Image: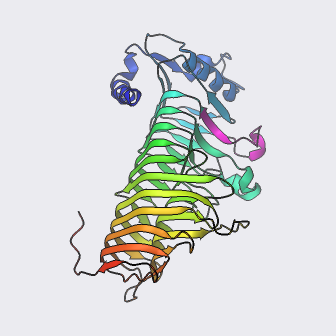
Amino acid sequence: MKCLKTLFSMIILVSCHLEYGDGRRILRIKDFITDTNHKNVDYSQVFQKAWKGLCEGEGEGTGGSSLVINENEKYTIQPQLFEGPCVSSYIHIQIDGKIEAPKRPKQWGNKRTESWLMFKNVESLFINGSGVLDPHGENWWRSVRHSKRPRTLSFKQCTDIIYNGLTQYNSPKNHISVYGCTNATLSNLTLLAPEKSPNTDGIGISLSHNIRILDSSIQTGDDCIAITGGRGGSSDINITRVACGPGHGISIGSLGKGDIDDTVENVIVRSCSFWGTQNGARIKTWHGGKGLAKNILFENITVTNTKYPIIIDQHYSNGGTGHVKGNAVKVSDVTFRYIEGTSASKIAIKLDCDENQGCHNIVMEHIKLTSAKPGKKLSAYCKFADVKASFVNIHINCGLYPQLLLLFSPLPKII
């Protein structure tokens, strides 16, 4: 946390005094171009040279390093791996211009790359700006299978990361991947892809701890945010003031696919909104999988024309098979609180839990959902769930599991 506080202090320093140096090493892309005519420049190689300069602390000054890409700058680059560890005490990249990938997949060079832009094993990295990342993923959707499409941006095995302010368009697959990271804040981001774009998740979090997603807008063809455990689990995730839609909602999961023991715990999703999404607050686990989803809070949520505003699905398959009979990811200690808005389907609350494990200690408080179709009544679907509900305007009957159901009307105003 000490490193993270240092990074936040550095944000203020960089924002106020970027043009004056202030002891930092200020680098620009043009500094690494050897062709004085700037014709036929391979900017992929130039960016690698710039990264080496950042990582090794080249340039003037006595502090950390900053690479500045101004508003009027535009670069086309092939896939890049920016790898640490670095000598610099911190690394700052300010992107106010546009960075794009080649428009055709065959122009990417290595089409089998995991990600277009990847930061790996980097500590104390701060990326900000008002610029744009555009990988031209629309050309991948039509011509390349999902499993072979790259993500736009990945942070892999990084520590103390801040990513703030940028806009990303049309990812071939996930817009952002956070994998194996500790202490990361992603904020004020805009991620955009059409509703029918395939598998264009907004932000995927896996095997990571102490991650914050704040004040962002995500429009995708898949999950706006998806949290998985991986081998080692994910924990302490905070998602606050995120606008999602269109898309598939904010999901814990999917968990338990294959032979991985997937664990996700201590997650807060707060003050988020969903518009025209397939799901709102969602937990999805593979039938027959292994793992744990525990201590999850969805609070102060607004849904508009959302198909399933609240859903726990322990029979998720996504077309897959081969599950071990009798296994199930354990889902417990989940709270849905202060959720209001409109449902696009009759079943506004769906708790489809496993017959062997069930879902335990599911708390629902102050839920007010109405149909997006005037005059239509809503219902809940519940199997094998231990639900404690109060101030919920939809009757929840979970059959075998005891529950406390208190119905009050009208509901108190949500602030």
Name the residue nearer the viewer: 101 or 179.
Answer: 179
Q: Against 207, is 375 above or below?
A: below
In the displayed structure image, the side of residue 131 where residue 409 appears, left or right: left
Name the residue rendered at 58%, 29% in the picture.
Answer: 121
Q: Residue at x 37, y 66 (%)?
A: 336
- In the displayed structure, would residue 359 be above or below residue 183? below
Can residue 69 be seen by looking at this rendering? no
Quadrant in the rendering for residue 332: bottom left
132 in the magenta segment: no
Quadrant where the image shows the N terminus: top left
Q: Which picture quadrant has residue 221?
A: bottom right
Number of callouts: 0
Q: Give the range drawn in magenta.
A: 102-119
Color style of the picture = rainbow
Q: Position of residue 69 (x, y in %)?
A: 51, 29
Residue 73 spot, x, y in % from top left: 54, 31
163 above or below 6?
below
Q: Is residue 107 magenta?
A: yes
User: Residue 385, percent across and down?
Assistant: 46, 74
What is the quadrant of residue 360 in the picture?
bottom left
| 289 left or right, relative to 145 | left
Q: Quadrant of the C terminus?
A: bottom left
Q: Give the camera-side residue of 332 and 381.
A: 332
- At horizontal 39% and vertical 22% (from top left) the residue drawn is 18
Q: Which of 388 and 124 is in front in this view?
A: 388
Does residue 106 appear in this view? yes
Left/right placement of residue 112 relative to residue 73 reads right
At x 66% / y 22%, what residue is drawn? 38
